[in-house]
Amino acid sequence: MAQRKVPMRKDIVTGEMQPKKELVRIVKNKENEVSIDPTGKKAGRGAYIHLDVATAEKARSEKTFDKAFGLKLSDDFYEELVAYVDHQVARRELFGNGK
């Protein structure tokens, strides 16, 4: 059987290309609302961040998504992002990668 191509995306914080499954998508819709997109299918402009708490903390300290989307995001958004990433990392440790 032929090997399937693994979709790759660039982590906006580190600039590294990573498999899409190891990233979480942050999306800005037409109403300029920014949210976490766990499915990766919401409509709007997306940016990706690695599922790593240190990377999420770096995004918070550098206000990475403010720059990427040209908006002023609240600290609550970054808190939610760090909590989400932390939760997903814990899930992966408990249940594996879901393969």
Image (cartoon, helix red, strand yellow):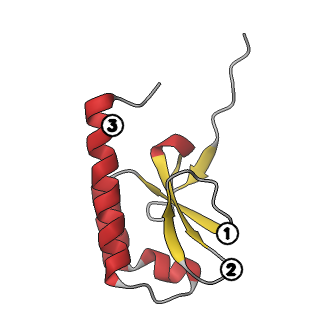
Residue 37 location (% of width, % of height): 52, 59
Task: Point out the residue furthest to the right here.
Answer: 2
Residue 91, quarter of the rendered image = top left
Looking at the picture, which amino acid does disc 2 mark?
Lys
Looking at the picture, which amino acid does disc 1 mark?
Gly
Q: Are marks 1 and 2 in contact (CB under 8 Å)?
A: yes
Looking at the picture, which amino acid does disc 3 mark?
Arg
Which badge, 3 or 1, is on the more N-terminal residue?
Answer: 1
- Which label was assigned to residue 44? 1
54 left or right of 42 in image: left
Q: Do the residues labelled 3 and 1 touch (CB within 8 Å)?
A: no
Q: Which of marks 3 and 2 is in front?
A: 2
**Secondary element at image label 2:** loop
Please tell me which residue is depicted at 53% across the width and 88% down the height of the picture: 71
- Which label was assigned to residue 92? 3
Between marks 3 and 2, how big is the CA–CA gap? 32 Å
Dot 1, how many residues are within 10 Å of its Cα: few (below 14), some (14-19), or many (20+)? Answer: some
> Relative to 26, does residue 5 appear above or below in the rendering?
above
30 left or right of 62 in image: right
- Specify the quadrant that holds the N terminus: top right
Which badge, 3 or 2, is on the more N-terminal residue?
Answer: 2
Which residue, given by chain and number where applicable, does mark 2 sit on?
A: 30
Please tell me which residue is depicted at 30% across the width and 45% down the height of the picture: 89
Please tell me which residue is depicted at 59% across the width and 53% down the height of the picture: 40
Please tell me which residue is depicted at 27% across the width and 35% down the height of the picture: 93
